[in-house]
């Protein structure tokens, strides 16, 4: 089963491709740190010279939480509609794999664009939904109810990470970011190696799709997805705090959708392994 997040590098909210959170924060010990007592406080990465002199930009041009919720709802809704179409039409897995490849290409294009493109993001969501619907239908034929269990599990992870983030049980720092990125790169590389062994050696490759090793690998994938959710929440929080442009809410929706798809796929794989022979 596929397990990939095409934007695991996480550009984040930015002006001129700079990160508005900890990744682009000024060095510790700067003038703002002395004034506020916060070692990572600094200037607003979105502020223009005229804004610094004459005040903040108009509120109407800034991203709000409502914008993030609405765009995320539209993107996830497109995924759900695509999944329902593929499920009801019983789309063959061959076509579903093609849809997954198209979704990956669209995701990579958006990942390297300087600005978010709503049509591109929604197109990604539609093709990703087709893949998820066909895959979920195939899994449901063998393990009835597994897709619904995966959906509930994904919702539980989302709620748990959100609560942990809001209560500061999870603190997103530079060290947290570097650790998650290193773990994600290792995870993706292991998945790629496993696919190569499956393609040329047959069977289950390195054994990441069954047995005890498959269970451990699935749990690691879900934990990584939860960590990416924390990074997503941090980016939204920073975007709101720094007054990110309203269009950046599409980037928030894109990142959250990617992460939730990652978690759902890992959850679905884990459930299939646990319920398998």
Image (tube, rainbow, N blue to C red):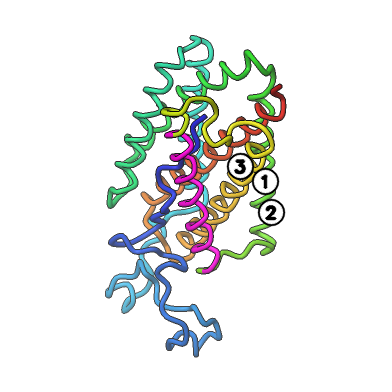
Q: Residue furthest top?
A: 89
In x, y percent, where is residue 175?
A: 53, 68
Dot in front, 3 or 1: 3
Residue 230 in the magenta stretch? The answer is no
- Sequence-wise, the earlier of marks 3 and 1 is 1
Q: Which residue is mark 3?
A: 217
Residue 159 numbered tag: 1
Query: In 3D space, how far apart are the residues under numbered discs 3 and 1 (Cα atoms)?
Result: 22 Å
Badge 2 density bin: few <14, some 14–19, many ≥20, Cα 10 Å:
few
* In this view, 234 is above or below 31: above
Front-lying residue, 200 or 209: 200
Label 1: state its secondary structure.
Answer: helix
* In this view, 203 is above or below 138: below
Query: In the image, what residue occupies the spot 43% across and 73% down?
Result: 25
Q: Quadrant of the C terminus?
A: top right
Query: In the image, what residue occupies the spot 66% across and 43% down?
Result: 216
Q: Which residue is mark 2?
A: 163
Label 2: state its secondary structure.
Answer: helix
In x, y percent, where is residue 188?
A: 47, 45
Q: Which residues are magenta?
A: 175-196
Query: In the image, what residue occupies the spot 50% across and 69% down?
Result: 174
Dot in front, 3 or 2: 3
Query: In the image, what residue occupies the spot 57% across and 46% down?
Result: 225
Q: Residue furthest front?
A: 201
Residue 141 numbered tag: none
* In this view, 200 is above or below 90: below
């Amino acid at each position: 089963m596929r397990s990939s997040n095409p934007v695991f590098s996480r550009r984040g909210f930015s002006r001129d491709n700079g990160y508005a959170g900890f990744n682009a924060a000024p060095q510790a010990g700067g003038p703002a740190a002395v004034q506020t007592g916060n070692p990572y406080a600094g200037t607003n990465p979105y502020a223009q010279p005229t804004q610094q002199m004459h005040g903040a930009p108009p509120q109407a041009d800034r991203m709000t939480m409502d914008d993030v919720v609405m765009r995320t709802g539209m993107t996830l809704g497109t995924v759900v509609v695509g999944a329902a179409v593929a499920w009801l039409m019983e789309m063959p897995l061959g076509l579903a794999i093609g849809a997954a490849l198209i979704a990956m290409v669209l995701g990579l294009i958006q990942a390297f664009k300087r600005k978010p493109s709503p049509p591109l993001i929604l197109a990604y969501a539609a093709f990703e939904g087709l893949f998820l619907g066909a895959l979920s239908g195939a899994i449901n034929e063998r393990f009835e109810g597994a897709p619904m269990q995966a959906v509930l599990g994904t919702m539980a992870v989302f709620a748990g990470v959100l609560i942990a983030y809001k209560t500061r049980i999870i603190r997103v720092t530079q060290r947290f970011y570097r650790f998650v990125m290193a773990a994600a790169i290792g995870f993706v590389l292991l998945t790629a190696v496993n696919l190569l062994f499956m393609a040329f050696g047959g069977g289950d490759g390195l054994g990441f799709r069954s047995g005890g090793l498959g269970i451990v690998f699935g749990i690691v994938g879900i934990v990584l997805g939860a960590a990416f959710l924390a990074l997503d929440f941090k980016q939204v929080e920073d975007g709101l705090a720094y007054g990110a442009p309203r269009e950046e809410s599409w980037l928030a929706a894109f990142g959250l959708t990617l992460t939730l798809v990652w978690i759902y796929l890992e959850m679905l794989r884990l459930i299939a392994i646990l319920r398998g022979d």
